[in-house]
Amino acid sequence: MTEDRQNRRYPHNLQGVLQLAVEAGSAAEGPAPAQPMTEERKTWLREALADVCKGQMDEVEQMKQCLAVLRKEETGESEMDEEQEEDERELAFEMLSELCENLDNARDLMTLGGLDLCVSQYLCHVQSGLRWRAAELIASCAQNMPQVQVHLLGIGVLPKLLQLTDSDPHPTVRIKALYAVSCLVREQEAGLKAFLSHDGFSVLMRGMQSESEKLRTKSAFLLLNLLTSHSEQKDTVVSMGMVQQLVSVLRSPHSPFHEHVLGALCCLVENCPQGLTDCRNPALGLEELLRQRVKELQGKEESQEELDFCKRLRAKCFQGQQSDDNGMDR
């Protein structure tokens, strides 16, 4: 076994490792039609990369090699070549995402031009697997990193992320793009300003009406967070018809994300006269909807927060409006 290891030829850089790993994954079977990479094969490739890279190069060097893979021109000579190239790039993104959990590495990736590459080349890539991995890497680097956030906002990433959130055909891309949006606008005044200038609240409104449960949940959660942190935006949101849209969402089949929707409505009736007026509009039927929802949630421990929001919203909007309350809010 020692002799086998001595005769084994190792590549000298990460690009070579990626190519070797991709080739080795299919060499044993000989030429074969292109097919999707199995999870087992992906796991083997990741482990092979980790074993070869561990201890052989420092983290900045690993990032440089990953970027060399991402910067390599696509040949497109055959279907198999395209599959191998995509596999290499996906693995490079996964390694970068892991490395950039370290904030220093996230800053170094920015300095190396990696974030600019993500924005200019990969957020618009034809392969959805590369689009969502680029958005995920942007989110990882931007989270809790004002310096990186400012840089990303300066190169115009937010409009692109909002567009992906709003209209990308692949649900995972939309979810990861919204994750990146959240990392750029929460606790970031410049990010919020850009978000508002590109009609970000409308994107969240449409996200809550999408077919993807995860996207609906993340959209409602971000809306609740922004209204809680930036109460000055309530009038803007109410003027867009958000109250009516949120109540419409509540009428869809019940889902856990309704908790965030109710929380957002509670925000919109507190110190916001127009929001309160909109909720009280009899045509909206909100009072009866809340009454029914309270009955459905009573006794369900897992729904306690949603139940509390229901009661709080009813008390704010309708307490004293009717005499047949039956003590439900007491």
Image (cartoon, rainbow, N blue to C red):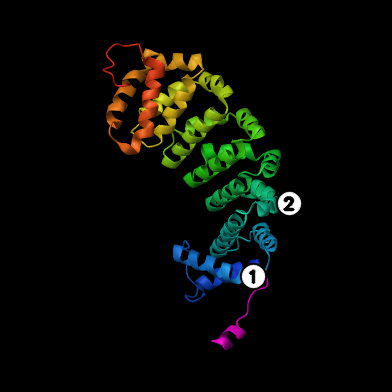
Rendered location of residue 170, percent (x, y):
49, 45
**Is 7 in the magenta?**
yes
**Which quadrant: the N terminus?**
bottom right
The residue lying toward the viewer, choosing from 181 and 144, is 144
Inspect this view and state whether residue 192 appears: yes
Residue at image location 47% in from the left, 75% down from the top: 29
**Which quadrant: the C terminus?**
top left
The amino acid on which the numbered mark 2 sits, given as a three-letter code, is Thr
Label 2 SS:
helix
Asked if residue 77 is positioned above or below residue 263 in the image, the reply reads below
Q: Which mark is residue 245?
A: none
Rendered location of residue 233, percent (x, y):
57, 23
Asked if residue 285 is positioned above or below residue 39 in the image, the reply reads above
Furthest residue toward bottom: 3
Residues shaded magenta = 1-13
Inspect this view and state whether residue 212 appears: no
Circle 1 is placed at which residue position?
55
The amino acid on which the numbered mark 1 sits, given as a three-letter code, is Gly
Residue at image location 29% in from the left, 16% down from the top: 325
The CA distance from mark 2 to mark 1 is 23 Å
Residue at image location 57% in from the left, 60% down from the top: 91
The residue lying toward the viewer, choosing from 153 and 162, is 153
**Is 107 in the magenta?**
no
Query: Crowding near pointer 1: few (<14 within 10 Å), some, many (20+)?
Result: few
